[in-house]
Image (spheres, coloured by chain):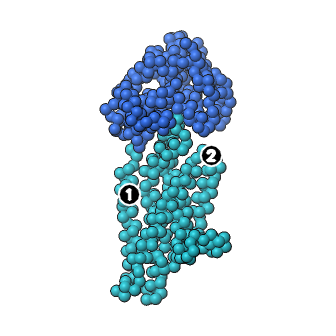
Chain colours: A blue, B cyan
Amino acid sequence: MSEPLVVLSGVNKHFGDLHVLQDINLTVDKGEVIILIGPSGSGKSTLCRTINRLETFESGSITIDGTELPEEGKQLAALRADVGMVFQSFNLFAHKTILENVTLGPIKVRGMKKAEAEKRAMELLERVGIGHQAEKYPAQLSGGQQQRVAIARSLAMDPKVMLFDEPTSALDPEMINEVLDVMVELAQSGMTMVVVTHEMGFARKVANRVVFLSDGKIVEEATPEEFFTNPKSDRAKDFLGKILSH
Amino acid sequence: MGDILRNYDILGAFWVTIQLSVLSAVGALVIGTVIAVLRVSPVGILRTIGSLYVNLIRNTPLTLLMAFSILGMTFILGLQLDEQATRNAYWWAVIMLAVYHAAFVCEALRSGVNTIPAGQAEAARSIGLTFAQSMREVLLPQAFRGSIAPLGSVLIALIKNTTVAAVILGTAESAGLLAEITENEGASLPTFFIFALGFVILTLPIGIATTNLSRRLSVKR
């Protein structure tokens, strides 16, 4: 069962003088759901983005399903196709329809036939509840709907692992649940997920492990139950005290 | 006035102006797009080549480029594009107009690329598109839509700048013919207005059309 899918070892990164990722070691097993949590500036988003090399790093290595992440070029593009990414600001292609957003990757990267890609895209859009809006443009959809399309766009590539970089932080409160519901369903279907989020309810419901970062270091790793009820480090206690007190 | 219209081929001269404009506009769009891609590419040396091109060409007077094409390229380097001297000058005029305005097309497009949120490129890369695919499928289509209005301005400037080709083309195009008429018949206001009107007819609709298009095709975010 526990087969390592994403392995980070000794990853270091600087933004100028700031050491944003300090000697990060993290293993994500197949089918595992990991929550990255931490105060702002702790490096959790950077860590998430480093896994598909949207951020470069200076030393250490990252392997995905046994293959080391290459630095540039076509091999990197090929590896990225296997790693889904959902952004805080959705980033749907603004000039393309919802359907085109979902079919672009399968057609251009996987070489799928257009009809086949559209059929599969419609299935995925139905799954996230946007099927009837396939011909619209992103700007015509609400934030929650756009984010669900973004999840469908990632799923269309049949990724081995999906990264979520604060997927609900830019959403109005009443739209957060519709996105979380899709993510819960995804987690229960066995998808390997790395999620940067502050949604504690979601973390408790689906996470196998919570990884707490502070100042670029992994401070604590525990099951959600253990982490939220009995954090070990002072840093985590302080952080949870702040976000759970209201 | 009637004599002038009868004795000189004004429509023919404007037809040459239109040919020069269309051919060099297509050339400028193609070269300018390539240079713009170089200028936003992840490879440092390509970016340097792109900015060298823009800064060198943009800051050279067009008249100088025209003179160089005949005096330098044809006479000294022997690069003749056609046996016939007038056809040779015609093709050099097209090339120099295209090369010159490509620098401005590049900058219009690059400013278009810069208005696209960084997340668009990140999303494109994260679904596995290569740099070339991201450019073609995601960034350039949005950049073109975002820079229609400035591209229209470049096109209008290009049409008016075709008059500089008179330096090497002589009386074949409109500005050259205007100079000849003025020399032979004396300066007259009506002659001047005919040529001015010709350029208004060519450029005004482009300004209106590109303004409308840029509004209609703008990418909604």
Q: Residue at x 60, y 35 (%)?
A: A75
Look at the image and tell me in which quarter the N terminus of chain B lies. Answer: bottom left
The percent position of residue B205, horizontal first and vertical second, equals 36, 64
Give the residue type at disc 1.
Thr
In the image, which disc is placed on residue A90? none
The percent position of residue B192, horizontal first and vertical second, equals 41, 80
Q: Which residue is drawn at 57% across and 74% down?
A: B83
Q: What element carries label 2?
A: loop
The percent position of residue B66, horizontal first and vertical second, equals 57, 71
Of residue B105 and residue A174, the one placed in the foreground of this image is: B105
Q: Who comes first in sequence, dot 2 or dot 1?
A: 2
Task: Look at the picture and state if A82 lies above or below B34.
Answer: above
Give the residue type at disc 2.
Val
Q: Which residue is drawn at 33% across and 30% down?
A: A131
Task: Look at the picture and state if A165 lies above or below B1.
Answer: above
Q: Is mark 1 on a helix, strand or loop?
A: helix
Q: Which chain carries label 1?
A: B
Tell me which corner region of the image, top left, top right, bottom left or bottom right, holds residue A246. Answer: top left
Of residue B88 and residue B158, the one placed in the foreground of this image is: B88
The percent position of residue B38, horizontal first and vertical second, equals 58, 51
Callout 2: few (<14), some (14-19), or many (20+) C-alpha neighbours within 10 Å? few
Tell me which corner region of the image, top left, top right, bottom left or bottom right, holds residue B95. Answer: bottom right
Q: Which chain carries label 2?
A: B
Q: Name the residue under label 1.
A: B211
